[in-house]
Structure formats: C-alpha cells, structure tokens
Image (cartoon, helix red, strand yellow):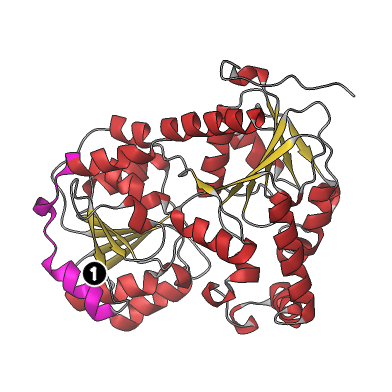
C-alpha cells in the first residue's frame, strides 16, 4: 500500500486530497452553504453522498466530482425520503476512500457513518440527529398533519419510536461518532449536545456566513417601519409566535420564506384579522433577501434552541439588529453589549415579545456595530480555521 507523506505546516491545500462526505443533496440551505466553503477550503476534493438530485447538483455544485451509493437508483426518493433514512447507514458504510489523505464529513444524521481505513476522519457535526436525541423539538406531532404515503411513513416511524429498536439506532449513532478521529461542533450549544449524547470533548468552528457579499451591497442605514421574519415557515421555528406578537403590538410584519406550515400561518393571520398587518412574501432570491435584511427595522428570530442560526448573522452583516429568543446558537452570535447588535427576550410568550416590539427603536442600534459583530463569522475565517485544523490533525500521530 502506498504510504502517505507526513503533512507539515507548509503543505499547500492543493496537495491534500480530501474526500468530503455530506448528507443527501436535494435542497439548498445553511448546510449546503457550509458544504460550499468546505469544498473551497480543500480544492483537491471529491464529494460523497448517499444520493442527490441531479438538477440541484448541476445548479449549485456543477464542477465537483461526486460519488453516490446504491440509493441513487432507488425509486420515489422524494416521497419516501423518511423511509429511506433506514438505508443511509449502510449506504455511507459502502464508500471506499482509496488514494485520499483524509475524510471530512458534514453530518446531521448519517454522513459520519463512513468508515475510512488508515486515514483520519474529521466530522463537522451540525447536531446529533434530532429525530433520535431531541424528538420533543420536532415539528410533526401526529400523522394527522400529513396525508397519503407520508402519513403511513409517519406511523411506520412511530412504530420504532421509544422501543429497544430506537435504542439500537442510538447505540449505532454513538459508535459512529466515537469512531471519528476528530469532531468539530458548529457552536458551543452543539458542543454540549455532543458531550451529552456521545461523551466526546470536541472543538468548535463556527459555520461560514457570506458577510463580505452582504456588506458589498448598497448600505441602507435608514430603517423602514416593519419587522421581518426570514426562514422556513414551520411551527418549530416560532413563526406563529412572531405573528401573534406583532398583532398584539400592532406592528407590521413581513414573512419571507416557504415551508410545510405556510397555509396554517395564513389561516392564523386570517383568524386574527391581521391581513393588513402581516404580509407573506414567499420565496425570495438572494438579492431580495439582502434588500429585506437591509431595510427592515429588525429581524425577529423566535427559534428555540437553534444549532447556530445563519440568518441573524446575515441581518447583522446588512447593518440590521436582531430580536431573538435567548436560547441556542444565537446567544453566541448576537451581542447585547459592545458592539450592540440585538436584544433577547427571556420568556417565550406573546406578551414578552410584543412588549419588545412595541418599544423597539432602530436608532438605538448603530448599523456599523452590527456589521462589526457579523465580521466574526465571515466565511473567510471559517476557511482559514478549517484548513489549519485539518493540517494539524494530519500532523498528529
């Protein structure tokens, strides 16, 4: 077998051949932005995933050499996605990494299940799988929220929940995490979860945020008189809390994004008779997103126990303060001191949030201070830290 040369501090990134492993690729979000900059950090890369959507990959990762598992050939992957979770551990274990120097996986479920031989495996953990370890926070509570095949799949999932079979899955997940040579958590919050569920002490490197691109847009320091929610429209994201609080405070709210509970949120607005106060914008482009973030009075981020939270940092990069619930990764990114870039509410109630909204004054926040805070999470910092982390890991015996 060809012996790998020992890496040193002067080793160029292009000399290190990296197998980048990720969860299935079919939609763009924070994880996919994360992946984009992992690939940028290691130009001599090849990508491995259980399966992917060809149109999606051609649009967002057109020049990347990509490997897939047997799952690529399975029928109805979109409709049976939850059912096919059962096959993912086997899919990731099937990969071989001949002639690579290291494996870097980006996991929130089973990407870390790969088993490289004789080379180091560094896992970037977005979170231990929440459907195993934090089920109380899941969006779906019963099959009544679903229809057709998805309702049947939910019943199938619940058949295994809270049984010895689920405990077996947890043990497999724990063992997969402990086979990794190194684990990087994306926040201190996730670091605590990794310690709790896997009993591993890990390092933290914050995810990349495209701060420079947002700051290059035209600066808007004069704020308009409306608040913004930007993200997936799901109940677990707290969209209903934002709507109710804005209605109670009688302040305008714009909701940008799509999700499974969009219709339910529209019904809530109708029930409150708040159509003139709450406006749904649907999907927005990157350019539209930056414009909204620049002009809004403040971003409302009513999410519980978020892993990191890219949107609040993007708001700060656009010179806009954030109103967030004091929990999760957002407590590590938003500053109430100097530079002041936002404010937290401590009770997860309509009254608490509406009180802040009613009294909020955008002139209390300097846009340049918000931008200064966002600089701490720029994508350039992520790339630099990850490159050096991998170099150091390869040096360790």
Please tell me whether the stretch drawn in magenta is mainly helix, strand or loop.
helix
Vertical placement of residue 365 versus 270, above or below = above
Q: Residue furthest right?
A: 1
Lateral position of residue 41 relative to residue 312, left or right: right
Query: Which residue position is annotated with label 1?
Result: 277
Answer left or right for 268 relative to 175. left
371 over 135 or under it: above or below: above
Q: For the view shown, which residue lies furthest in the front direction? A: 397
Residue 356 belongs to the span the image colors magenta? yes
Inspect this view and state whether residue 25 appears: yes
Residue 112 pos. (x, y %): 70, 50
User: Which residue is painted at 71% across and 76% down in the image?
Assistant: 148
Q: Position of residue 255 (x, y in %)?
A: 35, 61
Span shown in magenta: 350-368
Q: Secondary structure at mark 1?
A: loop
Q: Residue at x 69, y 78 (%)?
A: 151
């Amino acid at each position: 077998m060809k012996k790998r040369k020992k890496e040193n501090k002067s080793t160029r990134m292009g000399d290190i051949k990296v197998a980048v492993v990720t969860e299935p690729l079919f939609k763009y979000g924070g994880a996919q932005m994360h992946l984009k900059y992992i690939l940028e950090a290691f130009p001599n890369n090849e990508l491995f995933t259980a399966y992917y959507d060809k149109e999606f990959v051609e649009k967002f990762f057109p020049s990347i050499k990509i490997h897939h598992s047997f799952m690529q050939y399975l029928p109805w992957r979109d409709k049976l996605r939850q059912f096919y979770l059962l096959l993912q551990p086997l899919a990731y274990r099937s990969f071989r990494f001949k002639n690579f120097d290291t494996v870097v996986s980006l996991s929130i479920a089973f990407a870390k299940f790969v088993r490289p031989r004789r080379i180091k495996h560094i896992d970037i953990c977005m979170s231990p799988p929440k459907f195993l370890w934090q089920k109380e926070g899941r969006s779906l509570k019963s099959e009544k929220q679903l229809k057709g095949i998805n309702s049947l799949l939910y019943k199938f999932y619940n058949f295994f929940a809270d049984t010895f079979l689920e405990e077996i899955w947890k043990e497999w997940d724990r063992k997969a995490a402990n086979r990794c040579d190194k684990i990087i958590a994306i926040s201190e919050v996730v670091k605590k979860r990794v310690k709790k569920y896997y009993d591993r002490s890990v390092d933290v490197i914050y995810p990349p945020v495209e701060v420079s691109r947002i700051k290059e847009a035209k600066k808007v320091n004069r704020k308009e008189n409306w608040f913004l929610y930007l993200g997936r429209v799901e109940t677990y994201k707290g969209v209903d809390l934002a709507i109710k609080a804005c209605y109670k405070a009688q302040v305008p709210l714009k909701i940008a994004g799509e999700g499974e509970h969009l219709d339910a949120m529209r019904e809530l607005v109708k029930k409150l008779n708040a159509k003139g106060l709450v406006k749904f914008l649907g999907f927005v482009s990157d350019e539209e997103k930056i414009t909204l973030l620049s002009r809004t009075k403040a971003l409302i981020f009513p999410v519980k126990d978020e892993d990191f939270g890219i949107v609040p940092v993007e708001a700060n990069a656009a010179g806009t303060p954030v109103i967030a619930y004091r929990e999760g990764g957002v407590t590590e990114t938003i500053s109430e001191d100097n530079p002041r870039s936002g404010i937290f509410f401590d009770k997860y109630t309509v009254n608490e949030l509406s009180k802040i909204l009613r009294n909020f004054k955008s002139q209390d926040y300097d846009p340049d201070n918000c931008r200064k805070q966002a600089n701490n999470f720029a994508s350039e910092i992520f790339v630099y830290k990850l490159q050096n982390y991998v170099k150091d890991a390869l040096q360790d015996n």
